[in-house]
Structures are given as C-alpha cells and as structure tokens.
Amino acid sequence: MPTINVRQLDDVVVSRLKRRAADNNRSLEGEARQILQDAVRNDAPGRRQSFLVLAAKLRRETESCSQTPSEILIREDREAGLGFAGEPGR
C-alpha cells in the first residue's frame, strides 16, 4: 500500500489533529487517514453528476412556474428596509 508524507504542518494543525484523534479513539495517523478517506469519498465523480441530473430535473419541473428575478426581490427588500433573510437592514 502506498505511503505519503506530509511535511511542514503548522504546530496548531498537528495539535488539533491529535486532539481530534483522541476524541475519536484513533492514532494521529488513523485520524489523518480517516480525514483523507472522507474527503475523497465526498468528492466522488458520481456526486457531481447526480447534482447535475437533479438540477436538470428541477429546471424541467419548474419551467412552467413564474419566477421573479433575484435582483427584483433584493430591491424590494431594500426598499422595505429589510436586510439579509428579512432582518432589519442597516
């Protein structure tokens, strides 16, 4: 099985990794391995493809619905004195 070395890690990063490893009852190496495996698993090519398929499906299902352009909605909120997510503006 291939091996990789990661050099010049910041002391804070190593400290946090050690703490995270202890919290998960793993060695530092085991924790790093798990982080890398999770990162690769979450970045699988099929995941992007499934997003594109879902986005196309949503577009087809909503193409007959009237939609207001976002800039109009933002302008209306600003004129009403509202900020982000309907909170009072500045």
Image (cartoon, rainbow, N blue to C red):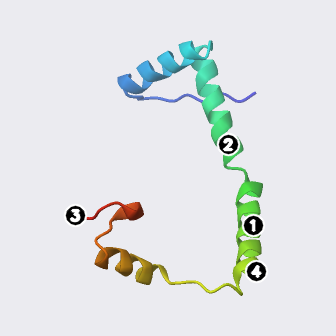
Mark closer to the chain start, 4 or 2: 2
Does the residue at mark 3 contact the one at mark 2 (Cβ under 8 Å)? no
Residue 31, percent from left and from top: 60, 22
- Quadrant the N terminus occupies: top right
At mark 4, the secondary structure is helix
Residue 8, percent from left and from top: 41, 29
Mark closer to the chain start, 4 or 1: 1
What's the amino acid at mark 2?
Val
Residue 72, percent from left and from top: 42, 84
Residue located beneath label 1 in the image: 54
9, 60: nearer the viewer: 60
Determine crowd level at label 4: few under 14, some 14-19, many 20+ residues with C-alpha closer than 10 A. few
Query: Viewer-nearest of labels 4 and 3?
Result: 3
- Give the CA distance from mark 2 to mark 1: 22 Å
Identify the residue shown where x is 74% and y is 75%.
Answer: 56
At mark 2, the secondary structure is helix
Q: Quadrant of residue 59?
A: bottom right
**Residue 43 in the figure: left or right of residue 68:** right
* Mark sitting on residue 90: 3
Residue located beneath label 2 in the image: 40
- Above-or-below relation of 67 to 32: below
- Give the CA distance from mark 4 to mark 2: 31 Å
42, 3: nearer the viewer: 42
- Above-or-below relation of 64 to 20: below
- Give the CA distance from mark 4 to mark 1: 10 Å
At mark 3, the secondary structure is loop
Residue located beneath label 4 in the image: 60
Mark closer to the chain start, 3 or 2: 2
